[in-house]
Amino acid sequence: MGSWTPHKLKLGVSGCPRNCAEATCKDIGVVCVDSGYQISIGGAAGMDVRETELLVQVATEAEVIDVIKAVTQLYRENARYLDRIYKWMNKVGLDWIKERVVDDLAERTALVARFEVSQDIYRHDPWAEHAAKQAQSYRPVADLALEAAE
Amino acid sequence: MSDWIDIAALSDIPRRGARVVKTHLGCVAVFRTGADDVFALNNACPHKGGPLSEGIVHGNAVTCPLHNWVISLETGQAQGADEGQVATYPAQVKEGRILLDKSVLVSRTPA
Ligand code: FES
């Protein structure tokens, strides 16, 4: 959210293998399955049409978030300007990416930390300001619940 | 005997919007139309209880956010082919303040 990337970055999350969100033709896709979450990358559905390739399957939502942050940061740090993930992946290889965000947990953690640094600067919640000033306007204007009938 | 009480400023409700008033029998939706008229209705659609205060106000009617029934703000009656009616309550605006009749609101008993 807000961080710059070499090219646009589309994400899709499907809650079940029927995959209604079409997560398997996004740059990063998550498909929830009984045993966890399949994270796959490098899809496209524009001029080029490509199915994502499985990066890893993890068991928890927290791991999903970390893996996505890490692969996004690896992409931010290494891909050429205007290379979508699938083009970058063609150059470095899926194994090279796996080594860093799947196998090497220390590297994953470091990537996540660096992604967070960029988010510190760029993350902007468009609703936060509105909520701070206007939250009251969504509440009941008056409460007569305790008024007794005479 | 009516007992008009001050609920809020007219400006507390956006034009073509609504706010709710909590009562012992659920929320009453207070609508403000584009022409600055104010109407008070039960905040439950006669169809399946949809929150009318979150619907879209057009003219003197609101479209329920759940299944698009159109409810007259004046009569509470469902428009068109749909049949049903929601309770309405007296409301008035005086010097920029919205007044509701408390005696009507608090004397209701569960249907
Ligand atoms: S609940 Fe209002 S239209 Fe169905």
Image (cartoon, coloured by chain):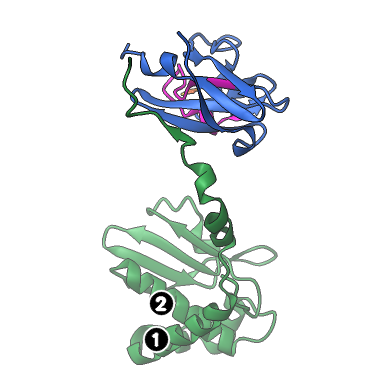
Chain colours: A green, B blue
> Which of A40/A81 is in front?
A81
Dot 2 alpha-carbon crowd within 10 angstroms: few under 14, some 14 to 19, many 20 or more: many
Residue B40 within the segment the image draws in magenta: yes
Q: Which residues are magenta?
A: B39-56
Give left or right: position of B68 versus A33: right
Q: Chain of mark 2?
A: A
Amino acid type at mark 1: Arg
Labels 1 and 2: the sequence-earlier one: 2
- As displayed, is residue A39 above or below residue B44? below
Q: Position of residue A12 (x, y in %)?
A: 50, 61
Residue displayed at 57% across by 80% down: A121
Q: Which residue is mark 1?
A: A108
Split into 4 quadrants, where in the image is the C terminus of chain A? top left
Q: Please report contact status of discs 1 and 2: CB closer than 8 Å, yes or no.
A: yes
Distance from disc 1 to disc 2, alpha carbons, whole Å, reads 7 Å
Q: Position of residue A34 (x, y in %)?
A: 27, 57
- As displayed, is residue B88 above or below residue A15? above
Q: Which residue is mark 2?
A: A67
Give left or right: position of A58 versus B67: left
Residue B65 seen in the current view: no
Amino acid type at mark 2: Val
